[in-house]
Image (cartoon, rainbow, N blue to C red):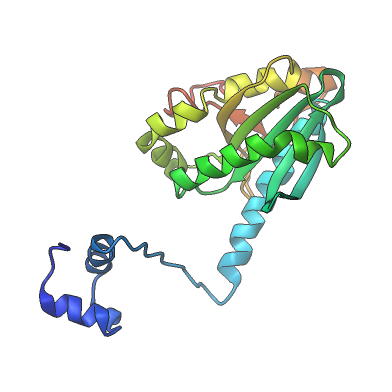
Amino acid sequence: MAGVSHATVSLFERGHCDTLSMAAIRRIAGAIDMRVDMVGRWRGGDLDRLLNRKHSALAESVAASMHHAGWVVEPEVSFSIYGERGIVDQLAWYASSAHLIVVELKTQLVDINELLGTLDRKRRLARQIAKSRGWDPALVSVWLIVSDTCSNRRHARNHATLLRSRLEFDGRQLRKLLRQPTSAQSGLAFWADSNPGSTRPKPHGPNASKVGGPSPGAPKVGLPGLGAPRSGAS
């Protein structure tokens, strides 16, 4: 079933995987419906710290931009509702229109199916999570905000049909939504300037003209399209 020799399967079964290629291991695992993950360990815990630093930079940039546009942002909101537990990366609240945005932040796109399942669960529980903060939302939006990298854009293009089925709007609509939160939306936006130590000039944010200065970050075009951002898209 795996398309490898009996000797290769025997090595796999006895735990001698150091002599096998990753391709052979994945073929065998796929034949028995088993998932194999490879975790990189670079200089001890440095890789984990690097990934956490990138996630923190993305979270700070998004929160600052929303704050500039007049939103209240609550980071790392935990919930436990009828046995369902988790953490919402950010909840954004616009009081005058009672609009809630559930924000999921990703520095790397990996498992799209699992990600969409997580977003659906948080969307379903969003009103109850918001009430624990004293908010009673009339509108609920869900946005997946992803670091703008070539790898993430390629991964999104490869799963465009799945992503569009749940996240129909892109970064242009997110900019409009932050200025005028009058309708519920679900979308994906690629976010510029979310890498620690980036020396690129920061573009003007979605509400820069309103607040009289540049926002720390800005969404780029996401779905539909999934192509490279056009000039001026930031």
Which corner quadrant of the image does residue 43 belong to?
bottom right
Residue at (29, 79) in percent of width and height: 17
Q: Is residue 132 above or below residue 141?
A: below
Nearer-the-camera pick, 207 or 36: 36
From the top left corner, tell me how far across and down residue 176 is, in percent. Answer: 67, 17
Residue at (30, 83) in percent of width and height: 15
Q: Is residue 67 left or right of residue 87?
A: right
Residue at (19, 76) in percent of width and height: 9
Which corner quadrant of the image does residue 163 belong to?
top left
From the top left corner, tell me how far across and down residue 178 is, in percent. Answer: 73, 23
Q: Is residue 25 visible?
A: yes
Q: Is residue 19 visible?
A: no
Q: Is residue 52 above or below residue 165?
A: below
Residue at (76, 48) in percent of width and height: 77
Q: Is residue 129 left or right of residue 197?
A: right
Which corner quadrant of the image does residue 66 belong to?
top right
Which quadrant does the C terminus fall into? top right
The residue at the far front in this view is 82
Query: In the rendered picture of this protein, how many numbered marks are placed on residues?
Result: 0
From the top left corner, tell me how far across and down residue 91 is, in percent. Answer: 75, 38
Q: Is residue 64 above or below residue 69?
A: below
